[in-house]
């Protein structure tokens, strides 16, 4: 059991530890470093997410992940029982990252704040494009009830944050919930259209379109629901853009 | 090899033929009839669809289908290599039925016609509720790239029919396509909300809400797209309901 020290000139990694003793070819593979457990796990997930960004999950093997990470296949297996587990871990990591992006900036009108959240959503979609598209389109071999639950949880977070952003106190009723869920599905449909059609509509134009849709969908719902009417009234009081849009529609 | 004649009093089926000679227990099972190949296939699919309507696909076994169809397990296997094949055949049959419901009635204003299509869509969702919900929610064990393709084909038919219904000649551009795709995703989100929340909103109210959404989503898109502006102008010329809705929003 001899620990080999990698030549740091080849790929400088300050946190690198001696190569794993049970990896015989380690000395010959410059990227093959011994990393602390948590760091290695995160590295493998990051590498997997990068591969899933440009290839559908069914075309990414554990060998590909091992190679891209500069690690051996057995090492990857020490962290993940198989591709399914790696995919789920990667999805969970991406879902957490996405949910983190739903943070509304403190300043600006409600639609400006929504614009900022949508911009970071589209940046996320662009970073993870193939994997995100495969996930939303469904039917991938790596999808299970568990992956479905992860995606649903992101939608629930988006729903909760949007409702809170709208200043709703207490529970959102069925109409307001339907409205926000529906708008979130429009956001997803737009992301898919954008991925499918190679970006025929610019992300900024898409974002503006989505904000307009939010305003008019809310206005059309308000007529039949007092809670949504309250949300609309608050929006119109704070947001000249929303006021101008609705005036234009009526003229 | 003796053909047994079933006692027709027990379950009268005029098209029944003598029980399959290779089914030894046939005489003791009143529902076990020899049927022509195509008819048996359709019967098994119909029975499977009925089971999928109230139970998620993972909870329906080939044994359940055989029992409900009054057939033996080997007989079911003669038609379908396994549960996956049966599920796909059932999904294909349901998809054809659903696509057939997108037919627009010849009379009425555009929103009345849309209402009629939505009514038959919600009737379909009610008939197939659990299976439809499982399908839209995704992550079911029986989902594959093939089932995803069947669902996508239904969405494409819905998109094509809606665009044609709007009087568009030639290709729908990216904005109009985005609008219609998005509205279809709102229809699906509403169906899911309805299934999840045990019908807190009546289907007729949902249908009216969806029509309002269609009108305002189109109006908000028209400002940035000449093709959609043409669609909106034609709609407003024919449809007093759409005119009244937009006026209300602007006031």
Image (cartoon, coloured by chain):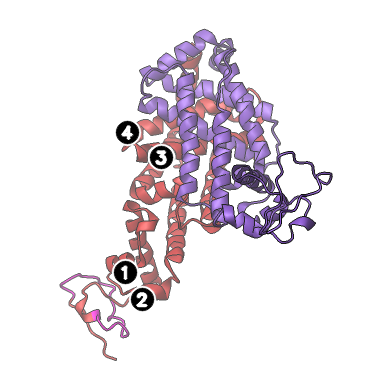
Chain colours: A purple, B red
Relative to B57, A144 lies left or right: right
Residue at the right extreme, as displayed: A9
Label 1 close to label 2 by CB (< 8 Å): yes
Per the model, the C-alpha gap separating discs 4 and 2 is 42 Å
Per the model, the C-alpha gap separating discs 1 and 4 is 36 Å
Is A157 magenta? The answer is no
The residue at 27%/84% (across/down) is B24
Residue B75 x/y as whole percent: 36, 76
Indicate which disc, 3 or 2, sits on the residue closer to the N terminus: 2
Mark 2: which secondary structure? helix
Residue A245 x/y as whole percent: 57, 16
Closer-to-camera residue (A57/B80): A57
Neighbours of disc 1 within 10 Å: few (<14), some (14-19), many (20+): many
Dot 2: chain letter: B
Which residue is label 2 attached to?
B75
Indicate which disc, 1 or 2, sits on the residue closer to the N terminus: 1
The residue at 45%/16% (across/down) is A167
Residue A144 x/y as whole percent: 48, 52
Which residue is label 1 attached to?
B66
């Amino acid at each position: 059991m001899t620990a080999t020290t990698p030549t740091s000139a080849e790929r400088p990694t300050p946190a690198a530890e001696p190569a794993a003793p049970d990896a015989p070819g380690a000395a010959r593979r410059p990227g093959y470093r011994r990393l602390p457990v948590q760091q290695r796990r995160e590295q493998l997930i990051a590498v997997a997410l990068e591969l899933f960004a440009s290839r559908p999950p069914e075309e990414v093997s554990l060998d590909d992940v091992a190679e891209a990470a500069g690690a051996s296949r057995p090492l990857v297996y020490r962290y993940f029982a198989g591709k399914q587990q790696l995919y789920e871990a990667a999805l969970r990591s991406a879902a957490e990252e996405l949910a983190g992006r739903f943070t509304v900036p403190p300043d600006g009108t409600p639609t400006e704040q929504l614009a900022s959240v949508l911009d970071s959503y589209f940046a996320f979609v662009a970073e993870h494009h193939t994997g995100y598209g495969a996930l939303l389109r469904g039917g991938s071999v790596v999808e299970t009830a568990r992956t479905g639950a992860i995606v649903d949880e992101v939608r629930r977070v988006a729903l909760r944050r949007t409702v809170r952003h709208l200043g709703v106190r207490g529970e959102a009723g069925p109409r307001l919930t339907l409205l926000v869920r529906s708008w979130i599905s429009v956001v997803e449909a737009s992301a898919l259209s954008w991925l499918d059609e190679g970006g025929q509509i610019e992300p900024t134009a898409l974002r503006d379109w989505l904000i307009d849709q939010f305003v008019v969908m809310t206005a059309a719902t308000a007529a039949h629901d007092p809670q949504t009417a309250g949300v609309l009234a608050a929006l119109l009081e704070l947001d000249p853009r929303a006021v101008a849009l609705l005036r234009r529609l009526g003229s």
